[in-house]
Image (cartoon, rainbow, N blue to C red):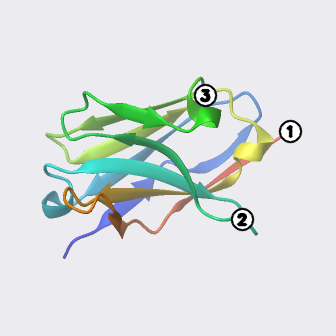
Amino acid sequence: QVQLVESGGGSVQAGGSLRLSCAATGSIFSRRAMGWFRQAPGTERKFIASITWSAHLTDYADFAKDRFTISRDNARNVVYLQMNSLKPEDTAVYYCASRDSDTLQYDYWGQGTQVTVSS
């Protein structure tokens, strides 16, 4: 069974930090880029960051460039999202996803983890 399982969400005050983790089964992690997305209530899911299999290339949304860092541990099949200087507008459900190497589409998604930032 292929799956992605996020963890590390929770409630934090503005200015705080959280590190999200996403554990993946091997078949949807190995040799694949991974991404993080988020969705706030009443809004569309938005891209946060991605990282290639080798971790040589990362990409960030503008809002994430200075505060969030994506990384991965290929030995453990885990991808991380370190979030610093959190703001109330960062409140959302955070999802990790695995990207197909041929289509470049994210075709496997986790169930999401809630992040709530209070002012």
Q: Residues within 10 Å of mark 1 (few under 14, many from 20)?
A: few
Residue found farthest to the top: 66
As displayed, is residue 66 above or below residue 22? above
Question: Going by the image, does 20 lie left or right of 16?
Answer: left
Disc 1 to disc 3, C-alpha distance: 15 Å
Look at mark 1 in the image and give the residue it sits on.
119
Residue occupied by mark 3: 84
Please state which of residues 51 and 12 is positioned toward the viewer in this rendering: 51
What residue do we see at 42% from left, 56% from top?
A: 96
Image vertical order of residue 40 relative to residue 66, above or below = below
| N-term-proximal mark, 3 vs 2 | 2
Q: Give the label, 3 or 2, closer to the camera.
A: 2
Cα–Cα gap, marks 2 and 1: 21 Å
Residues at circles 3 and 2 in contact by the CB criterion of under 8 Å: no
User: Which residue does the image show at 14% across and 51% down from the upper left?
Assistant: 30
Of tags 2 and 1, the one toward the viewer is 2
Quarter of the figure with the C terminus = top right
Q: Amino acid at mark 1?
A: Ser
Q: Residue furthest bottom?
A: 1
Compared across the picture, whether 67 is left or right of 52 comes to: right
In x, y percent, where is residue 6?
A: 42, 57
| Residue 68 position by quadrant | top right
The residue to which callout 2 is attached is: 43
Element type at mark 1: loop
How many numbered badges does the structure rendering display?
3
SS at circle 2: loop
Amino acid type for the residue under numbered disc 2: Thr
Q: Quadrant of the N terminus?
A: bottom left
Where's residue 66, x and y in %?
A: 59, 23
